[in-house]
Amino acid sequence: MTATYPTSSDSSITANNAELQRFFTLLVQAMSDNSLQRLLLSKYQGPETDLQRLVVSPVKIKSALHWRFVWQYQTNHQTHNYPLPDAVNLLSELLPAQFKAGQLSTTASEVQLTISKKGKVLLNIKKTTNQQQADTRHNRQKQRFVEQSRPFLTALGVTDQQGQVIPAMANKWKQINKFIEVLQSAVRDSGLLQATQLHVADFGSGKAYLTFAMHDYFCHTLGLKAQITGVELRQNLVDLCNETAAGLNLAGLHFEQGDVKHFKARGINVMVALHACDIATDYAINMGIRTGAEIIMCSPCCHKEIRPQIRLPDVMAPMLVHGIHLGQEAEMVTDSLRALLLEAHGYQTKVFEFISLEHTSKNKMILATKRKKPLDNSEALQQIAAIKQFYGIKQQCLEQLLLS
Ligand SMILES: C[S@@+](CC[C@H](N)C(=O)[O-])C[C@H]1O[C@@H](n2cnc3c(N)ncnc32)[C@H](O)[C@@H]1O
């Protein structure tokens, strides 16, 4: 296909039309020889109020190559697929009239087009070593642990009606997938795949993205019979989540208003507390241990209990005089004590980064799976005592709860 660039309606940039023509030639060439990986148009200045960007990529539909246009609005995405001639015509109407920047990624180069406010056109071409052709499979997806087309994601506002992730929810989508990935490997290790009936409790369920995702994983992906209970302080969130679960006909998923500190539960197999505030995490772990949960998963939130108790050994005073360091030390001590207490109560425990800092600052996971045979716990108990003595700690909530 040859590239004919239409005369721009924007007279301020016609003088510089050669650079635009060059961009357009490279674009049409890449679309024609299937070397285009992605075209991103940004700096939108057209008539629609909340359109932000347009992403164009190849897609095979019934073995014919088409071009997928994903119109990215502030709160949703709209997708349309076009054959080559229609795609080229449409792009010639949009650039430069409505979009003032374009980034063309091909197997051979990265081409950046920018049009300044005064109409000056800049073209920057860089050779790349990425020789891979674009993946043109329809509905191609990264390896995900939750199916992007699941209705609960749309009901919770993670995806739009077309099943596309809403840009503002991209981090939540990553977090949901990472969480299910971690849960999946814990379920495999714990032997729960053989269970005929499962009970899962999620303390501090909040808006319940992860509670719904767990229900989907156990009931839809694994096909198990599971009872999932979200426990949440705020009644309005409980009502909202119950309405959403009922609207989706999700049997076995329900939410209760309650304070984890006073909640009574029995027979929990999987105890989850994600970002439950401060010592709410300790109450949740205590309940998990006491009910004999096979899996305990928590991602601690704020750590207020230990910090004021820490007595600084002299050599550490210049380090911990900085509030940020003292906070980090208190967090590490708190979560180490929690992990050791879990070990002392028959759990194999790992502490690791749940999801990288760029997605959320609450990024630590304590994952404990119940040992088939408990080990001698005297070493863990000695270590707990030594840490407390070293830092001058008199009281730790989980330890007290386990003693009571
Ligand atoms: C930061 S949100 C986390 C929500 C969800 N778990 C997540 O990770 O997306 C913490 C939730 O815990 C709830 N919460 C805090 N303390 C609680 C308690 N003692 N009992 C039950 N819920 C609690 C809060 O109301 C809030 O909705």
Image (cartoon, rainbow, N blue to C red):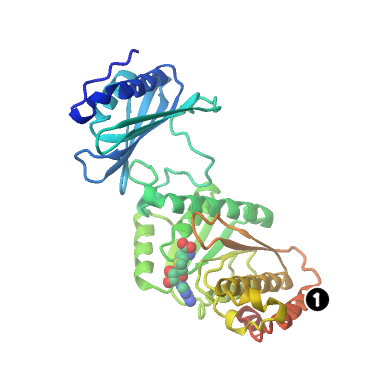
Position of 31 with respect to 7 (left or right) is right
Image quarter of the C terminus: bottom right
Callout 1 secondary element: helix
Residue 266 figure quarter: bottom right
Asked whether residue 3 is in view, the answer is yes
Image quarter of the N terminus: top left
**Frontmost residue, 337 versus 51:** 51
Asked whether residue 10 is in view, the answer is no
Residue tagged 1: 378
Percent position of residue 52, x then y:
30, 43
**Which residue appears at 56% of the width and 71% of the height?**
324
Around disc 1, counting alpha carbons within 10 Å, would you say few (fewer than 14), some (14 to 19), or many (20 or more)?
few
Number of marks present in the image shown: 1
**Which residue appears at 34% of the width and 46% of the height?**
160
**Which residue appears at 43% of the width and 64% of the height?**
254
Furthest toward the top, the residue is 2
**For residue 366, above or below residue 78:** below
**Frontmost residue, 7 versus 140:** 7
**For residue 48, above or below residue 288:** above
Percent position of residue 83, x then y:
33, 21
**Frontmost residue, 17 versus 372:** 17
Position of 224 with respect to 82 (left or right) is right
Percent position of residue 367, x then y:
63, 62
Residue 197 figure quarter: bottom right
Mark 1: amino acid: Ser
Position of 303 with respect to 119 (left or right) is right
Q: Is mark 1 within 8 Å of ligand 1?
A: no
Position of 205 with respect to 243 (left or right) is right
Residue 87 figure quarter: top left
